[in-house]
Image: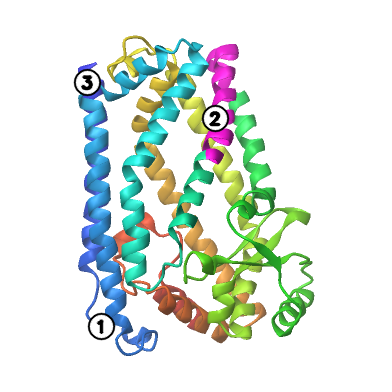
Amino acid sequence: MITLFAILIVIVAADFILERLLAFLNYRSISASPPSELAGVYEGDEYRRSQEYSRANSRFGLLTSSCSFALLLGLLCFGGFGLVDGWSRALGLGEIGTALVFFAILFLAADIITLPFSLYATFVIEARFGFNKTTLPLFAADKVKGWLLTMVIGGTIMGLVLWFIELAGPSFWLWAWLLLSAFAIFMAMFYSSLIVPLFNKQTPLADGELRQAIEAFAGAQGFRLDNIFVIDGSKRSTKANAYFSGLGPKKRIVLYDTLINDLEVEELVAVLAHEVGHYQRRHIIKGLGLGLMESGLMLYVFSLCLAYPQLSEVLGAGQPGVHLAMITFAILYSPLSTVSGLAMNSLSRRNEYEADRYAMDHYGAPPLAQGLRKLARNNLSNLTPHPAYVFFNYSHPPLLARLRRLQG
């Protein structure tokens, strides 16, 4: 028990130290002047503002991660998880009911504790740099909707997994993996049509120069694209984005209204060509498949640990419980999650290069490069991130690396 507890503390501390070391390196890498190849991205005082924005987020990240680390350390050292387990068991709801109440308490408590940080990030930092468009009522509505979705969808999935464990024991992992796989595929197909409308309004792109240019490009590539939507991202932020979602006939391109306002038609089509490149290179299918394989491996390893009551007892609980074992296992598994996360980020960055290459070959490098420059400028992106920070945290290559590939 002492050895297991020590391992948990070492993993939690090592994760925090690694995160802060990477953040420190990234903070120190903020350059007084941009690289010569990116000299024209920011104009006038904009580069200084981008530096201030990066520093503000870095300092805020230090505060939030330190509080999270202290909270988790306190729960481990003073039996906080065991205390919550005792509250949950006192309701007499059975193993599945106890587990659901246990996770609901932890979820709501964590969200309430972090609420001041979310408010500060949105209404102070983002507002100070001109990004925030969220109102307090909209923020509150988003929060309540997020709670309800988490409890309904997350609670249902968790309840079924716990039920599989009761019925099948260690072999539950296969049934749970099939359930999670079906859910992941369903969400990949229908997320934009079922979940996004709860938070944003999506409207078909109106007829005009942009739609005609997009349809002309798609037609030239033999790419059937019936669903092009504009999302009202401007009601929350001035930051721009675009993404591809769905599978098969449910695929759709979603453009933020802020993106349409910031970029010219050729640049928008180039960005869309990049998103089409992801689909044509089957990045979405491959990413989904790898994610399902990873979840299957995780569930199988967890099934091997169910026979060890120490996973519950080390958290200060009076009796074993699957929900307690899940907490301990999540911490023990986190080093493997870090390794798999590095692999997925590396693959994602490679996919971004491939999508850029597709856009360059089938539409042109200059409009895509100019569009990427504008996006970086409008989002006050850090132009000089530290390579180690990029390696661990970036799912997209930095702007300079992408432009060099396009120019090369």
Residue occupying image coordinates x 64% and y 30%: 178
Residue 337: percent from the left, percent from the top? 41, 40
Q: Is residue 151 magenta?
A: yes
Viewer-side residue, 302 vs 80: 80
Q: Is residue 282 above or below residue 363?
A: above
Residue occupying image coordinates x 30% and y 19%: 83
Query: Label 1: which residue?
Result: 33
Q: Quadrant of the N terminus?
A: top left
Viewer-side residue, 157 vs 306: 157
Q: Is residue 23 above or below residue 380?
A: above
Q: Is residue 385 magenta?
A: no
Magenta segment: 148-173
Dominant secondary structure of the residues highlighted in magenta in the image: helix
User: Which one is earlier in the sequence, the residue at label 1 or at label 2?
Assistant: 1
The answer, for residue 280, to whether it is visible in the render is: no
Residue 98: percent from the left, percent from the top? 46, 17
Viewer-side residue, 272 vs 402: 272
Q: Is residue 255 left or right of residue 170?
A: right
Judged from the image, the secondary structure of the residue bearing numbered disc 3 is helix
Judged from the image, the secondary structure of the residue bearing numbered disc 1 is loop
Q: Is residue 225 left or right of residue 255?
A: right
Crowd tier of the residue under label 3, counting other residues whose Cα lies within 10 Å: few below 14, some 14–19, many 20 or above:
few
Query: Label 2: which residue?
Result: 155
Label 3 to label 1, Cα distance in Å? 49 Å
Q: Which mark is residue 350?
A: none
